[in-house]
Image (spheres, rainbow, N blue to C red):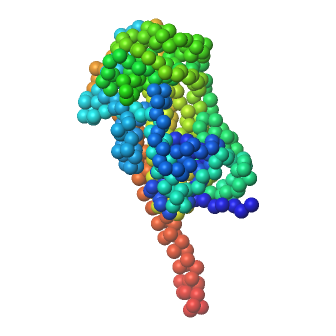
Amino acid sequence: MQTDTFDLVIAGGGMTGAMLAYVLLSQNPALKLAIVEQQAALPQQQGQAAVAPQVSFDSRSIALAAASVELLAAWGLWSQLAPSACAIEHIQVSDRGHFGKVYLSASEFNRQSLGQVIEIEYIGALLYQKLQQFSEQGALYWFRPDQIQQLHKTQSCHQLQLLSGQKISTKLLLLCEGGDSPSRQLAGISQQQQPYGQCAVIANIGIQNPHQQRAFERFTPQGPLALLPLSRQRYSLVWTVTPDEAARLIKLKDADFLAELQSAFGYRAGVFQTVGSRVSYPLTLKYSQDASSHRLVLCGNSLHNLHPIAGQGFNLALRDIAAVAALIKDQPDPGCYAVTSAYQQLRSADMEKVMSLTDGLVRLFSNSSRILALGRSLGLTALMQCSELKQAFANQTMGFTPLKAQQLKAQQLKVQQVAAKRSLSQSSSQSSELNKQGPGGQSDANI
């Protein structure tokens, strides 16, 4: 069977993989890119006329930090997503049963919003519509349903054998398959796992009165309880509890579930009136210390799968995408060592800081120690009272601090690479000139 050759191959065509493909092809129209996706195509992914997003009361949503919204705007997507999103203008952080609280308001930081919440169907439908255009232009190829079965590294490429028998090769392989990425295992990249002994219960909640764009993060002894504002007078609920409690909550009748939620949260968000379908999943911190390898990079949950506290997961993935896009722009060999090593440098610090923040919050607030509880309350009070601390905390959670640091580091690495190439070129020229000269500095032609 003939081997198809690509500049880039993305393993995984979900939210991260599709976004990565769109950004890279938008900025580098000459690229030839393929996506290997395990799931068969949905109607809106099959080249038919545009299909309206199938959004319902139960649609799942994601929280976009303010810096992530700016990235989406720079990539030409936000103007089409904005009408379907709900702004977060206020955030209240509290510790149940203790005095510490923090209030954040967009107006404090001269912003219209601290972030946005949007159903994933809107993002998915727009991305696949955009990707279809690249497919029609011959820049994008899909292999689905399919997956990488064998992976062979050479100096200049990765040679891939797919489950279907198809053979393809690529200068750079980008893994976006999720937390249990099978291709990461094939590549021999290890993953660390730390189970939290918690489960997240996910549901959408209908409320009696308008939420006024307020979001809540309430810490309880079992884990955090988050409410994010949605359109149509709803909240997106992420309720962290023990596995046994999650199983019990899932089975409750709607009225009983709402009563327990109201009891656990209180009435600051108003009266909870309706609840949609409920799902739960176990929470485990999963991450790889190696963000890249030979002609390979990891993005999204294939690299870092976080606790949902503070809603940092997909925002971290968007910065992964921004890093890849910055590094391969105008790069003749997108899989060269300069790209993969720079990606490791760009993403390591951000990833470690966000993982430390989310993991630390989980362990600090999911604890019944009275001493720790007092420390938490004092910490939240200090954050509330000190404007400098509050600004720094907001800039980090809104994504501006890590994004600006990454952009600056990317520029520095580009300058270093250009300087190194210039130095190498000058050394080569000098060596070549010396080789042309004979003894005493005479050229070979005069000997």
31 horizontally vs 108: left or right: right
> Vertically, is 163 above or below 95?
below
Kindly give the residue lying farthest to the bottom in the view shown: 446
Residue 21, x across and y down, in percent: 52, 50
Assign the C terminus to one quadrant of the image.
Answer: bottom right
Residue visible at 29% across and 30% down in the picture: 106
Assign the N terminus to one quadrant of the image.
Answer: bottom right
Residue visible at 33% across and 22% down in the picture: 211
Kindly give the residue lying farthest to the front in the view shown: 49
Residue visible at 38% across and 49% down in the picture: 76
Residue 54, x across and y down, in percent: 48, 36
> Vertically, is 109 above or below 94?
below
Residue 204, x across and y down, in percent: 46, 23
Viewer-side residue, 173 vs 409:
173
Residue visible at 46% across and 9% down in the picture: 259
170 horizontally vs 225: left or right: right
> Vertically, is 150 above or below 308?
below
Residue 81, x across and y down, in percent: 39, 41
The answer to whether residue 105 shows anywhere in this view is yes
